[in-house]
Amino acid sequence: MGISKGEEIYNLAKELFPICRSLSGDGVRESLQILSDYVAKDGIKLEQKEVPTGTEAFDWTVPKEWKIREAYIEDKNGTKIIDMKENNLHVMGYSTPVDKWVSLEELKKVVYTQSNQPDVIPYVTSYYNERYGFCMSQNQLDALEDGEYHIYIDSELFEGSLTYGEVVIPGESEQEILLTSYICHPSMANNECSGPALLAELMRYVKKMPCRKYTYRFVLNPETIGSLVYISKNLEHLKKHVVAGIVLSCVGDDRAYSIVHSRYADTLADKSLECILKRKKHFEDYSFLKRGSDERQYNAPGIELPVVGYCRSKYGTYPEYHTSADDMGLVSPSGFQGSYNALTQWMECMEYNGYYKMKVLGEPQLGKRGLYPTVSQKTNYGGVMTMMHFITYCDGRNDLFDIANIIDVDPYKLLPIAKKLIENDLLEVLESRGAK
C-alpha cells in the first residue's frame, strides 16, 4: 500500500527545508531543481528562467544576487555562539560581509531577536539596504557574558540574476487557471516549503487529468519582486487568458482553511474557492485588507487579475510565523492532504463549471431514467431532494458555485449529479460568465 499524497508532499517539503534561500542565488536554483526533478517523472518540464540584476519591473528593479557561504559569532575561546550551519535563520538575509571583533555592546546593535517569543530565532532580511546582521533567541542573547566577540559573514552581493520557475500544461481552451507560490525564504516549513511542495503535486494532478478544459499555468518565484517581474513580462497574456488564480502560502498546517480575497472579492476565483472552503470545519475569511503575499501584486491597480490567496493558517496569524518555530513539526501529512483535497476538488469543480440549464420543459421524469426511486415513500425523499434542488436552479442563470450556495451544498458533491444529468441528455452547460 503506497503512501498518501499528504505524505508525499510532506516528504518533498522536508527535502526543501534545509536549503538557505533568499530573493536570489543558488538556494533558489537548488530548490527549483529538486522540484523540477520531482515533477519530471510525470513528463513535466519546469523551466528555470534568469532575469538579470538591474532589470526593471514596473516601479521596481531586480537587485543584486546574494551569495552566502558562512556566518557565525564566536567568543574569545573560539566557541561558536551561533552558526548558520546549524540554522540558516541565524544570518540576516542579504547580509554584507564582515570579519571583526566587537564588544558585547556593539554586538547587540547587529543582533535581532523576538523579545515577545524569547525562545525562537526570528527571520529578518534587508534586501534593498546594504547592511549585515545576525539573529538569535532573546534568551541566548541575554545569556551572553561581557567581553569580545568575533562576528564573521562570508557573503557577497554582485551583478547576477533572479531565478523563477514556470510550467504550462495546455488544455482544450486558451483560458487559463493560474497557480503560484513563492520560493525565497530560508528554513521555514509552513511559510516557505509548503507552497512549492503542494504546487509540485498539483502539477502532477493536472498532468494526469484525462481531459482538461483549461490550460494550467504554474509559477514559482521569489515573493514580491519575483511576481512583479513575472507579471511585467506576461501582463498582456495574463489579462487576456487568466480566468481564476490562486497564490499558495502557508498550506501545510492542520489548523484552518483560509481565503484572502481579491480587492473587491467579486471574481470567479473568490466565489469558487470560498464556496469550496467555507464548508470546512474551521474556515477563515479574510478581506484584501489583510493581504500580505503575492495576491498584492496580481490585484494592484492596472494589473487587476482575478487572483486570491489560499492558506491553511494565514501568514502572520500563527505564533510560529517568521521564526525558527516554523519547522517540520508545524506542518503535517494530514495538513497537506487537506490542502491537496481542497484544491483538487476546486480544480475539478472549475473544469465542470458553467451556467447550467435544463434541456426539458417542466420537471423531468427522473424515474424512467433510473434517477428517482420507483417506490415512493417518505423515507426516500432525502436522497433525491438534493438532485431536485439542483435541477430547480438550473435555469441558465446560475453556475455550479451559485447553485451550491443557494442550496447550501458542497459544490464537489454536486458534480456527480451534474454528470448524471448530462449523461442522460437533461442538462447543458453554457459558457461560464467568468470566462474572457
Image (cartoon, rainbow, N blue to C red):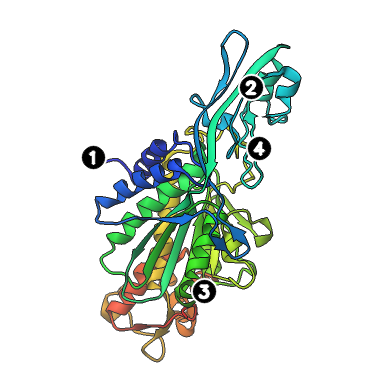
- Residue at image location 51% in from the left, 38% down from the top: 186
Is residue 220 in view from this perspective?
yes
Q: Nearer the viewer, mark 1 or mark 4?
A: 4
- Location of residue 161 in the rendering, given as x and y in whole percent from the top left corner: 47, 51
Residue topped by disc 3: 402
Residue topped by disc 1: 1
**Amino acid at the residue labelled 4:** Arg
Q: Nearer the viewer, mark 1 or mark 2?
A: 2
Mark earlier in primary sequence (3, 2): 2
- For mark 4, does the 10 Å Cα neighbourhood hold few (<14), some (14 to 19), or many (20 or more) residues? some
- Location of residue 50 in the rendering, given as x and y in whole percent from the top left corner: 43, 55
Q: Secondary structure at mark 2?
A: strand
Using residue 145 as the reference point, say whether residue 78 is left or right of it: left
Residue topped by disc 2: 100
- Residue at image location 69% in from the left, 24% down from the top: 138
- Residue at image location 25% in from the left, 54% down from the top: 42
Q: Residue furthest bottom?
A: 361
Residue topped by disc 4: 131
